[in-house]
Every structure is written in C-alpha cells, then in structure tokens.
Image (cartoon, rainbow, N blue to C red):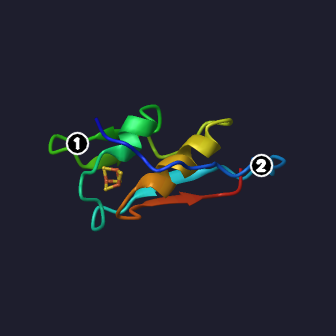
Amino acid sequence: MQWYRPFRAPAVTAQTGTAVRVQISSERCQGHGRCYDLSPALFGADDEGYGTVAADGSVPPGREPEARRAAANCPEQAIEVTGDG
Ligand code: F3S
C-alpha cells in the first residue's frame, strides 16, 4: 500500500469560463501511478504504467481540485494543469 503526503486542494474560485486542462509530460513521467490512483476519472495508464490523460485532457467542472491534487502528488512534477477553473 502506498501512502501519499497530505494535500489540501486550493479553494475553487468563481468560474471564469476558461476550461481547465491537464497534460502529462512524457519526458518527465516515470510511471509512479499516483495520478490515476488519485483521479481515475482524469488519468489512465498506458501498457507500461506511464500516465495518460483521459480523452483530450479537459477537466470537467467540479473536478479541478482533483486535477490539482494529482499534479501536486506527482513526484516527477510531470502533470501540468492549465486554465483557471
Ligand atoms: Fe507519471 Fe506522475 Fe502519474 S510520474 S504516472 S504522471 S504520478
């Protein structure tokens, strides 16, 4: 069983209409798997266990904290969250 350091997601502020997206740097990802363990709705794994983003990387409304939590828990800092949801 893996333990993850505690993380407090930042409060979500007013919606601005800008879509939040996630992407994974294939150069940085080492396959730790925390992203898809923490947020299987937003991330998946390829055949070798490296992280992938679901669909086109768009983050559905309400899942922004989840995206930021996954990014904060990636030991390689391979996840980028863009937009301001
Ligand atoms: Fe890769 Fe980080 Fe996820 S290393 S598998 S993006 S937790």
| Amino acid type, residue under disc 2 in the picture | Gly
Q: Quadrant of the N terminus?
A: top left
**For the point 71% across and 50% down, which residue is it?**
85
Q: Return the residue at label 2.
A: 17
Nearer to me, 60 or 7 = 7
Q: Are discs 2 and 1 less than 8 Å apart at CB?
A: no
User: Label 1: which residue?
Assistant: 46
Q: Where in the figure is residue 22, as x and y percent of width and height?
A: 50, 52
Give the SS element for disc 1. Answer: loop
Number of callouts in the render? Answer: 2
Q: Residues within 10 Å of mark 2 (few under 14, many from 20)?
A: few
Residue 25 versus residue 32 in the image, above or below: below
| Residue 39 visible, this angle | yes
Q: CA distance from mark 2 to mark 1?
A: 31 Å
Left or right: residue 69 versus residue 15 is: left
Quarter residue 44 falls in: top left
Horizontal and vertical percent position of residue 80: 49, 61
When asked about the image quadrant of residue 24, the answer is bottom left
- Residue at image position (46%, 32%) is 41
Kindly identify the residue that appears in the image at 44 percent across and 38 percent down: 38
At label 1, the amino acid type is: Asp
* Horizontal relation, residue 24 to residue 15: left or right: left
| Mark closest to the chain's N terminus, 2 or 1 | 2
Question: Does residue 53 appear in the picture of this structure?
Answer: no
Secondary-structure class at tag 2: loop
